[in-house]
Image (tube, rainbow, N blue to C red):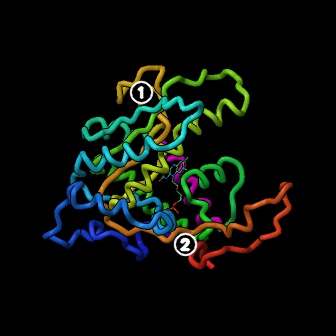
């Protein structure tokens, strides 16, 4: 069972707003900053893609604090070659939405085929399903729920209050073959900060997700955001007050993915240490 935006485990009072709650008002930074004291384990256990967000604004200080905490992450050679574009302008969001819709028309279609087919797809379909989460270990029901949540996000993209676009300075040379370590060090210098951002958002009760499909066309994203050629967008993190709820998430047992000394030697296969870490 895993499926986004539907499960219990609401952690923070700030998440309590619902569509029917007329008294709800978006919280200020002062009201939610205490959430950052929450147990790291609880936050990690329940952080997950929350795509359905309310259109209400998010206090700038909350967004800034999330990014400030993101900056505590490591970067290759401590280059700190990151830039974060915060998008609140509706027309700019609409430009990214257009790209997201184009990409989703293709990938969402494949995702639905995979969900209906009931099997693990290989090739492009499998890759796409994995990138968007639509081949989740939770099975087809979970896939269908994720697909519906992505569809909601695609349809309501302009209404998401804030998009954070983490970027890297120092472009990769396109079409030039590079050793794997160059690629891994390049993107490895942004994703730790993105995870920090997601955990900070979760702790303060914001809904967030990590998405890449709106970056379908680097050229048009660059144009929409005014990015110079030397700045490469890595992903998009929409932030807002959640309509749905956080975790738990569905993941494979730790013992299934841990290999000791040599790939394939998995003495802990099937094991997990804490209940709730998988669907079982
Ligand atoms: C590199 C990357 C790209 C992703 N791109 C998208 C995307 O374009 N759209 C989307 O809805 N989710 C996207 N996701 C989110 C995944 O679907 C999500 O992390 C996964 O389903 C796990 O979800 P959970 O944490 O809620 O269990 C992306 C995740 C990663 C790591």
Magenta-colored stretch includes residue 111:
yes
Check disc 2 and report its element: helix, strand or loop.
helix
Residue 159 rendering spot, x and y as whole percentages: 27, 50
Relative to 81, is 154 on the left or the right? Answer: left
- Residue in view at x 61 percent, y 61 percent: 135
Which of the two residues, 270 or 77, is positioned nearer the viewer here?
77
Q: Is residue 34 left or right of residue 149?
A: left
Q: Residue furthest left?
A: 23
Looking at marks 1 and 2 on the same chain, the residue that comes earlier in the sequence is marked by: 2
User: Is mark 1 in CB contact (under 8 Å) with mark 2?
Assistant: no
Mark identifier at residue 222: 1
The residue lying at 49 percent from left, 61 percent from top is 147
Horizontal relation, residue 111 to residue 270: left or right: left
The C terminus is located in which quarter?
bottom right
Query: Where does the magenta region start and end?
Result: 100-117
Q: Which residue is mark 2?
A: 141
Task: Decide whether the magenta segment is chiefly helix, strand or loop.
Answer: helix
Rendered view: 243 above or below 131: below
Query: Residue visible at 43% across and 74% down?
Result: 7
């Amino acid at each position: 069972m895993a499926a986004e935006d539907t499960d219990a485990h609401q952690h923070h009072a700030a998440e309590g707003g619902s569509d029917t709650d007329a008294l709800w008002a978006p919280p200020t930074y002062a009201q939610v900053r205490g959430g950052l004291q929450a147990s790291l384990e609880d936050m990690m256990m329940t952080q997950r893609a929350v795509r359905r967000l309310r259109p209400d604004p998010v206090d700038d200080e909350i967004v800034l604090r999330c990014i400030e905490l993101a900056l505590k992450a490591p970067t290759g050679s401590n280059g700190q070659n990151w830039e974060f574009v915060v998008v609140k302008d509706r027309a700019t969001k609409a430009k990214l939405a257009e790209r997201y819709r184009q990409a989703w028309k293709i990938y969402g279609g494949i995702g639905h085929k995979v969900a209906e087919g009931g099997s693990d797809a290989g090739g492009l379909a499998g890759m796409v399903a994995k990138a968007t989460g639509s081949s989740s270990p939770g099975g087809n029901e979970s896939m269908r729920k994720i697909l519906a949540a992505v569809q909601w996000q695609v349809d309501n993209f302009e209404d998401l209050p804030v998009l954070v676009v983490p970027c890297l300075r120092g472009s990769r040379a396109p079409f030039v073959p590079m050793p794997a370590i160059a690629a891994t060090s390049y993107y490895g210098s942004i994703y730790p900060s993105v995870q920090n951002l997601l955990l900070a958002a979760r702790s303060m009760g914001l809904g967030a997700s990590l998405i890449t499909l709106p970056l379908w066309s680097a050229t048009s994203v660059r144009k929409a955001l005014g990015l110079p050629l030397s700045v490469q967008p890595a992903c998009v993190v929409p932030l807002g007050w959640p309509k749905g709820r956080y975790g738990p998430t569905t993941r494979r047992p730790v013992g299934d993915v841990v290999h000791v000394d040599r790939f394939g030697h998995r003495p802990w296969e099937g094991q997990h240490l804490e209940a709730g870490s998988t669907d079982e």
